[in-house]
Amino acid sequence: MCLRVSKWLLSFPALLFAASLVGCAPQERAPAPNVEPLSEAAREVAYRDHVLYERDRVEWLHPGAVIPDVERVRFVSATEWALAMAECMVGEGFQVTARPDGGIHAELVPPEQGEAQAIAFYVCSVRYPIDPIYLVPLAEDQMYYLYDYYVLELVPCLEAEGHAISEPPSWQVFRDGYLTDPWSPYSDLPPSDEDDWIAINEKCPQQPANLFGPGT
């Protein structure tokens, strides 16, 4: 256990003391996790779930939409996804660009084209689905590697850029709440325009390299 002075007296409602006992953050970065590759069967199950989710999304937004049958071209990595989606969407007739932060930007379309755009997104996301390794819940060593990065690298990086970041939770609190109430230093960042958002993501990446295995 480490004694650390809390920035806020009410960081943890059960403790009304300026000093709070929290789990110690390590002072040297944890090694990258050893991520076991998914079996082909598990990958196919995850892919089928992805297709059903995307189909349900279109049907919820546009009841009665005719959704085409689509074959997968290939799985893409997290870093490939934005470019693959943008190129596919342009091929489907919609102006979409890949963003440096890993997302995509779609031009607004008239309401009467909304259904067609949603179907195009479905088509592209089924053709170029993100590799299921990025979609399965993190193992505990991956969670710890992520937490370690947040505390030792991401928080100092964001603070050096002038952002006030709240006191990190203990490792135990982070782990126990990861699926239901995940914490990220990025939660403390104020709204910003697109250029500022991209710049801070490039300077202080939201996740460490190799979180999902070597090269990811």
Image (cartoon, rainbow, N blue to C red):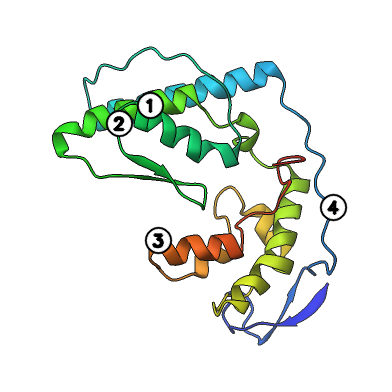
User: Which residue is denoted by mark 4 in the rendering?
Assistant: 31
- What residue would you read off at disc 1? 122
Q: What is the secondary structure assignment of the residue under circle 2? A: helix
Q: Position of residue 170 (x, y in %)?
A: 71, 66
Q: Could you tell me the amino acid type at mark 3?
A: Glu
Q: Tell me if residue 115 comes above or below residue 44 in the rendering.
A: below
At x 72%, y 60%, the residue is 149
The three-letter code of the residue at mark 1 reads: Tyr
Q: Is disc 1 in contact with disc 2, using a CB cutoff of under 8 Å?
A: yes
Cα distance between the residues tagged 1 and 2: 6 Å
Q: Quadrant of the N terminus?
A: bottom right
Instruction: Give the residue type that dot 4 points to.
Output: Pro
Does residue 201 appear anywhere in the picture?
yes
Q: Secondary structure at mark 3?
A: helix
Q: Kindly identify which residue carries mark 2.
A: 118
- 158 left or right, relative to 151: left
User: Disc 2 residue type?
Assistant: Ala
Of 47 and 172, which appears nearest the observer? 47
